[in-house]
Image (cartoon, grey):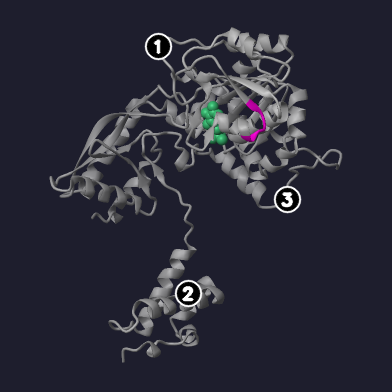
């Protein structure tokens, strides 16, 4: 009998023997809801047409929908895109010490804002301030949710209702939603564009300063570089001018790091300590870019200014939680021993990884890839260049190797290629590559443990 009235009731479904295990796994409430959802979908889609599923089939649909809802959508993936610090893929991988600290602190109460010596209220910044000042030479430090928040809070505290001159060459956009001019407007200060896109001189800063000026600001142009006939003013010179005029000098480093990366054969990226030495009153930078830690915005500098920033009510809205503090401390602690940093910190391990090591990984992976894609695609190893990403060292690329997948078919190559890329994204640990010039590339610099990849190749369902 093929009428909707023959569908079982919710109650009958819940008393069916197959419903017992579902209730054990997901609870009575969720199973009831899924019974209602599946029945309602059947009433709407199959009204009058085609055979209705039997009760067993309905329970299987309920089971599938319950499994799907129980799976978190936020899941681990393998980043083989060739961009090491990929914002859309969560940026820096944390070291084990940081993850252990997170689970230790997350599990219960902690002295986040409690002074164990006096039994009085404490300050959450105290947990990282001394290691930050030791590593940078700054007097004081505070931490907020990300570097965008650090810039917003600094400008709002020190320059609300005032003017801030910034070089036209530094009005950067970072990933669409963060533009220096827009964040300045939201912080309540007025941007005064000075100089030209390619050249800005000290005289441009001097001319822009008046009684309404709140501070001088330098933005590290971290995701592009202007080349050719260019001039920018040295930090030291802006700092001297700011001191003469009794104005704070703020440097937004973006992807500032704490140690000179040239020590590991990488290009030099300005460090937070160098910015302080050059005379910045305040320096802001991200926790999860080159630093290799949790998402955070770090603000360091002169104590009186940091105190003002911390007492801004906006700080409360932008502060970080105990898990971030716990992880950040562990990452900063690793910087105290530069000799072991390139093995202990995953971001630096990936950045400084030798080409020989990557070539070896590529050699190990080629045979299982050839087998997995047999008849569908040709796999080879090609030379690539990795981007550091997140606006760090934009022009500096790191040599790497990728597995290169090219469909055997000559018809609908693009569709086939996209289908293969999608199949890799459907694996239990989704694998994210990049399509370039009609080829699917899996860059291997960021693959720490090849067994995670080889272990699931058998589950690949190709189009
Ligand atoms: C990345 C970046 C920011 C924003 O930092 P988030 O941590 O992503 O919020 C701000 N300024 C500069 C110069 C940057 O490079």
Membership of 63 in magenta stretch = no
How many numbered marks does the figure carry? 3
In the image, 370 versus 11, the foreground residue is 11
**Mark 1 → mark 3, Cα distance in angstroms:** 56 Å
Give residue 463's quadrant in the image.
bottom left
In the image, 206 versus 49, the foreground residue is 206
Kindly identify which residue carries mark 2. 34
Q: Nearer the viewer, mark 1 or mark 3?
A: 1
Residue at x 73% of width, y 47% of height: 110
**Mark 3 → mark 2, Cα distance in angstroms:** 37 Å
The circle on residue 228 is: 1
Badge 1 density bin: few <14, some 14–19, many ≥20, Cα 10 Å? few
Could you say whether the residue bearing mark 1 is in a helix, strand or loop?
loop
The circle on residue 281 is: none
Q: Give above or below for 223 relative to 404.
A: above
Q: Mark 3 or mark 2: which comes first in sequence?
A: 2
**Relative to residue 205, is residue 448 drawn left or right?**
left
Q: Are marks 1 and 3 in contact (CB under 8 Å)?
A: no
Q: Which residues are magenta?
A: 186-190
| Percent coordinates x, y for residue 354 in the rendering | 37, 26
């Amino acid at each position: 009998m093929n009428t909707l009235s023959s569908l079982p009731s919710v109650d009958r479904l819940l008393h069916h023997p197959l419903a017992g295990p579902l209730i054990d796994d997901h609870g009575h409430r969720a199973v009831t809801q899924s019974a209602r959802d599946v029945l309602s979908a059947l009433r709407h889609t199959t009204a009058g047409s085609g055979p209705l599923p039997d009760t067993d089939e309905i329970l299987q649909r309920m089971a599938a929908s319950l499994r799907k809802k129980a799976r978190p959508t936020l899941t681990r993936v393998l980043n083989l895109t060739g961009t090491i610090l990929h914002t859309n893929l969560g940026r820096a991988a944390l070291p084990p010490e940081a993850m252990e600290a997170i689970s230790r602190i997350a599990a219960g109460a902690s002295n986040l804002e409690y002074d164990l010596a006096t039994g009085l209220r404490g300050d959450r910044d105290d947990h990282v301030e001394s290691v930050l000042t030791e590593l940078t030479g700054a007097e004081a430090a505070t931490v907020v949710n990300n570097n965008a928040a650090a810039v917003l809070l600094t400008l709002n505290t020190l320059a609300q209702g005032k003017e801030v001159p910034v070089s036209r060459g530094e009005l950067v956009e970072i990933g669409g939603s963060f533009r220096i001019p827009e964040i300045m407007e939201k912080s309540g200060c007025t941007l005064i564009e000075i100089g030209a896109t390619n050249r800005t001189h000290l005289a441009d800063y001097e001319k822009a300063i008046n009684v309404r000026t709140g501070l001088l600001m330098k933005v590290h142009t971290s995701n592009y570089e202007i080349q050719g006939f260019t001039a920018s003013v040295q930090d030291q010179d802006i700092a001297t001018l700011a001191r003469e005029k009794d104005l704070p000098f703020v440097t937004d480093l973006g992807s500032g790091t704490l140690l000179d990366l040239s020590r590991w054969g990488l290009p030099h990226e300005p460090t937070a300590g160098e910015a302080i030495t050059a005379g910045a009153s305040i320096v802001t930078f991200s926790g999860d870019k080159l630093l290799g830690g949790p998402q955070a915005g770090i603000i360091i500098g002169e104590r009186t200014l940091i105190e003002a920033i911390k007492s801004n009510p906006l700080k409360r809205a932008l502060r970080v939680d105990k898990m971030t503090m716990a992880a950040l401390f562990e990452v900063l602690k690793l910087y105290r021993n530069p000799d072991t940093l390139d093995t202990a910190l995953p971001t630096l391990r990936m950045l400084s990884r030798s080409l020989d090591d990557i070539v070896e990984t590529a050699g190990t992976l080629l045979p299982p890839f050839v087998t997995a894609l047999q008849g569908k695609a040709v796999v080879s190893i090609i030379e690539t260049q990795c981007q550091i990403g997140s606006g760090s060292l934009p022009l500096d690329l790191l040599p790497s190797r990728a597995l290169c997948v090219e469909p055997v078919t000559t018809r609908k190559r693009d569709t086939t290629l996209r289908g293969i890329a999608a199949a890799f994204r459907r694996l239990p640990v989704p694998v994210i590559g990049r399509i370039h010039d009609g080829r699917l590339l899996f860059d291997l610099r960021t693959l720490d443990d090849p067994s995670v990849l080889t272990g699931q190749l058998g589950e690949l369902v190709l189009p």
